[in-house]
Structure formats: structure tokens, C-alpha cells
Image (tube, helix red, strand yellow):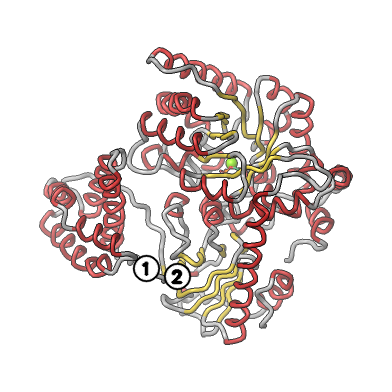
Amino acid sequence: MGRGLGGEMAAEVCLHQKQNVSIPSCGAPAARPATLQGLPVAAGLGVGDTFLFPGLSFQLSGAAPRLADSRSEKARLVEAEAAIAPEVAAGESPDASGGMTAMLADPLFRGSIIDRIEAGMTAADAVVQTTHDLIAIYADLADPVLRQRAEWAEAVGRRLFRWLHGLATPVFGPGTRRVLVTDEMSPFEATRLSPAHVAGIVAERGGATSHFAIIAKQMGIPVVGGIAGALRAIRSGERCICDGLNGLVYLEPDPDTWVAAGTRLAEMDRERADLAALGGLPATTRDGRRTDLWGNIAGLADVQPVLDAGGTGVGMFRTEFVFTGDEAPSEERQAALYGEVLRRVPGPVVMRTLEAGGDKAIPYLAGEREDNPNLGWQGLRMCLDLEPLFLTQLRAMIRASAEGELWIMFPLVSARWELQRCRELVARANTEVVRDGGRPGNYRVGIMVEVPAAALLADEYLRDLDFAVIGTNDLTQFTLAADRMNPRVARWYDPYHPGVVRLMAMTARAARRAGKPIGVAGDLASDPAFVPVLVGLGFTFLSATAPRLGAVRRALGATDSRQARELARTVLSLTDGDQIRTLLHGSGRPG
Ligand code: PEP
Ligand code: MG
């Protein structure tokens, strides 16, 4: 089984391994060594000891205060402090352990927690509330030393919180890398992971385009999803190889597999270096036709990797990641952040307005529980109902627009009236900025095409817009009625489905007729095999996460634009996703 980790051997290995897989339903861990088959969610190979990390959102329980027994809650807090103190002291760097140890004893931090417990809160709720308050106080300060206190407060608060819920947090010494085993992780939690310490993720749920997977891809962390019962089947501290390309998890692997993983990792390092060297090349096809290559980001930290990979713009800034925490960020804070992103990026920055809901639930924006959140009150719908919140974000963007090239983008548009309303609100936000003494904004306005209705009406919609971007992740989900989060319907979730590809083609044609830029920002834009089709369909920019930009650039450089048009025509004549896959990859989907 020594060659099982090579990409070219994937199909053979999957078939071979499937026969050996058994995840015990009784809760007894499988005998070792063992190989578990899941779904390939984020490609890559991670090697490290496992750490069981059940998901737990760092948020208030919603329990009414004054119900807790403050004496026992205080005792629990003291116990939690004593338990995490040695972990904190052994932190990943002297700076981190010093900062966190000081925070643990900080009179403001500790005092506020105790006050809240005495007022009747549970210790866990008191920790959450105090941590959020301290973040709000420190995160906006100009002094970097004080600002860092926000980070220490959060790190300590989260550790206390997990301990109070009976869960451990991994301790990462220098050079330690772990494979996290989880049931489900929120994308907001995922942004807190560090690829320096997280070698891979094994998840019970989550599909390839679930938002936590997207964040992991952005950070280059491999993920295997869809392993039901993983938290029961895997023990903490097992040696593990997480093969995100093939969806395989090797536990206590035999020496051959271990050596093969080392070889594959070295190959991947070489490949990464080769692709990084392409960063300076122009983004053109072999015959010199330009297609802009931009990056997807979730925050300021993602900008430099995009620029390093040769991205000349940001094709989608998922601004919802600015809205984590206990309350919405102020206009001031948003304007400063958006301005900084615009300043750093030499080309356009497509800022998508807040898209919360679904698997990106933000507690303070949560509405009533819905039976079908993916078809419910989320994204633009939420913003249109929460007008003050929406206007605050629009004003912040407009105030920042002097710093660069701002393109404002609305997600999940389905109806024409939404576009009109968005235009009115942008105009109103602009007027308010000017009224308050600011400069009028300089921006373009566009939409994401991710609901089939928007693709079908692209001709009409694009008349009033400056650009459009296809979100292939949602367009696939909504065209095929297959939840992008649910591993059980992964078979039905197929971005190569002709229904999806034809809707993309319709939109690209409409944009060409209107003479407007048209991009792709979903996962399909980072699929090198599909890049020639996108070129042939006439997309003018592609936006991918930084780690994928090199492979996309190489695919673009190998494409001849005339042949690409021919290829796109052939693809559009096919009637089945597997036919398209076979045409582009030489084989269909296994299983
Ligand atoms: C998409 O739907 O393809 C997209 C780019 O947006 P998100 O993945 O954030 O929903
Ligand atoms: Mg989307």
C-alpha cells in the first residue's frame, strides 16, 4: 500500500481501502493500524498525532442569569484556572505564555468574571461575556501592546470555557503539529487555527465547499470530512496521516505507509516551490489572452499571501468574518479595516456584503430556528431586513473607498427588487457619508450569481450593474438541491453537472453582451482541469484562495484560448457531470 498517498493512485487506493473500512458503531475504537475512508474535502497531506476536538461555540448559553449557584460556579472557575495554568505556561512561545499567564491573573479579566458569577451567571457565561468585553475594549486601541491583550484575553477565555464544558484544548509547543478530530467546526472557529500547529482536520460532517473547509483550504490545512463516528472511532494521541486529496485517514500506519507519506510530503514541498516561482508571470493564456487572477480572502491576514502568489486583486472578500464576536463591529472599525485592505491591494477589491446564516451563524444575528436554513433568512435577505446594520457596513465601505479600487458585491440575489433596494441603500449610505463630512465614494456595484434565477435573468440584471461574480459553491447547491454541508448528499453535489455549467455559460454570455467584467469565485475557479473551460466560456477574472493561485496560473498558461472555446462548446453539449469529468480528467467520479 506504499503508493497509496500519490494523487495518481487515488482511485485504486480508494477502492482497495473501502473494502477494509469499518467504523465501529458500538463506540469501540477500531483495531490498529486502521484506515478510514471519508470525503476529500481539502487536498493536502497532514501528519501528526490526533487530538479529539469536539466543536463547541464560544458563545453565551442563553440561560437566564441569577439561576446559577454562585459559590459552586466560583469554585469551578478556580478549578478551571488551576487546570489550565500549566498549559498556558507551556504556551507556544515565551511571549504567548507570558501574556496568557498575566491575563489569567489580570484583575480586570478575573474581577469581571467573578462579578458576573456573583450576579448569578454561570462561570462559562461569565467567561464568554468578559472575554468579549475585553476584546471590544482592547482590539480598537492604537497601542499594539494593548491591542495584543485582546488576543491573550481570547486565548485564555476560550481555554477556560472549554475546560468548564469538560473539553480539553491542545497544547502546542514549538514545532508540535496535531491532526484535529472534530464533529463539525464553524468557519469562524476555523479562522483561529494556525497551519503551523494544525497538520490536518478529520471531521464527521462537512462537504468540500462547506465554509469551514473553505477557510481550511485558504490556510493550506488538509481536511477529510464525512467520517461518521470519528470522535468515537479515533483515540487521542494516535499517529495519523490525514490525506485530504483522497479522503483517507491512516491511524498508526505501518512503516511503508509512513515512508510513503514522507516522500509525498517532500514532493508536495517541491511542487509548492515550483508553483510559487510562477507568481511573477503574467496571468495570460499560452496565446497571450489575459484573464485576471485574484484572491479570495476572509480578512487582512489573507491579503499578503494573495499578493505573494501573484494575485493582482481580491475577487471576493468574505466580510462576514469581520462580524465574529459578541456584537457587530463599529463603522469606525470596519472602515479602518476595509481601508487597510484597499491600500494593500494594487487592483480591485470585491467586497461582498455580510453573508451570515446557514453554516455561518452569527449568534447575535440569529433569527428563529429554521427547518431549512440554506433556503431561509440568510445573506442579503438578512441585511435587507436589518437595515441599520447593512447601512453601517455600506458607509464603512464607502468611507474606505478613497484608499483603493472598491467593488461592492451583494450575495445570494434572487429577485430584481433586491437589486433596486441595494442600489437605493448604497446611494443613501453615500449621501450619509457626505453629510457627515466625508468624500463621496468611488466604487462599482455588482452581484454574486449563485441562485439559478440570477443566472437566468443575467441579461436583465447586468444592465443595471457594473460586474457579476459566479459563486459556484452555492450555484451548485441551489441548482441541484444538494446541501453543500451534508456528506450524505455529496454524490448529488456536483459542480460539473451540466445544469450548473450551462447556467454559468448563460451568465458569461450576458456579461459579454453587456461589456461587463464577469468572474468566478467559487471553488470551481481553483480547479486547474476546469480552468480552460472557464477561459473558453469567456470569464474575465478568476478568484481563488492563495494556496491555489499557482496551480490556476499554471493551468491558464497551458491553455490556448481558441482550443478553450472549442472545449467549452463540447462541454456544453454534454448531458452528464461524469461525461464532463471524463473529458477533462480522463475518468469519472469513483463510487
Ligand atoms: C460560492 O457560493 O461559491 C461563494 C463563493 O460564496 P461562499 O462559498 O462564501 O458561499
Ligand atoms: Mg455563496
Q: Position of residue 408 (x, y in %)?
A: 55, 29
Tell me if I can see residue 482 in this picture: yes
Callouts 2 and 1 close, C-beta under 8 Å? yes
Tell me if I can see residue 384 in this picture: no
Disc 2 residue crowd, few under 14, some 14–19, many 20+, Cα 10 Å: many
Q: How many marks?
A: 2
Residue holding disc 2? 178
Residue drawn at (41%, 59%), measured in percent from left and top?
Answer: 55
Q: Which is more N-terminal, label 1 or label 2?
A: 1
Taking the image as shown, residue 203 lies to the left or right of residue 578, namely: left
Q: Is residue 455 above or below residue 206?
A: above
Q: Amino acid at mark 2?
A: Arg
Residue drawn at (25%, 57%), measured in percent from left and top?
Answer: 99
**Quadrant for the C terminus in the image:** bottom right
Residue drawn at (65%, 57%), measured in percent from left and top?
Answer: 277
Q: Amino acid at mark 1?
A: Phe
Question: Between marks 2 and 1, how big is the CA–CA gap?
Answer: 8 Å
Residue holding disc 1? 172
385, 111: nearer the viewer:
111
Q: Is residue 576 above or below residue 76?
A: above
394, 127: nearer the viewer:
394
Q: Which mark is residue 480?
A: none
Q: Secondary structure at mark 2?
A: strand
Q: Position of residue 434 (x, y in %)?
A: 43, 14
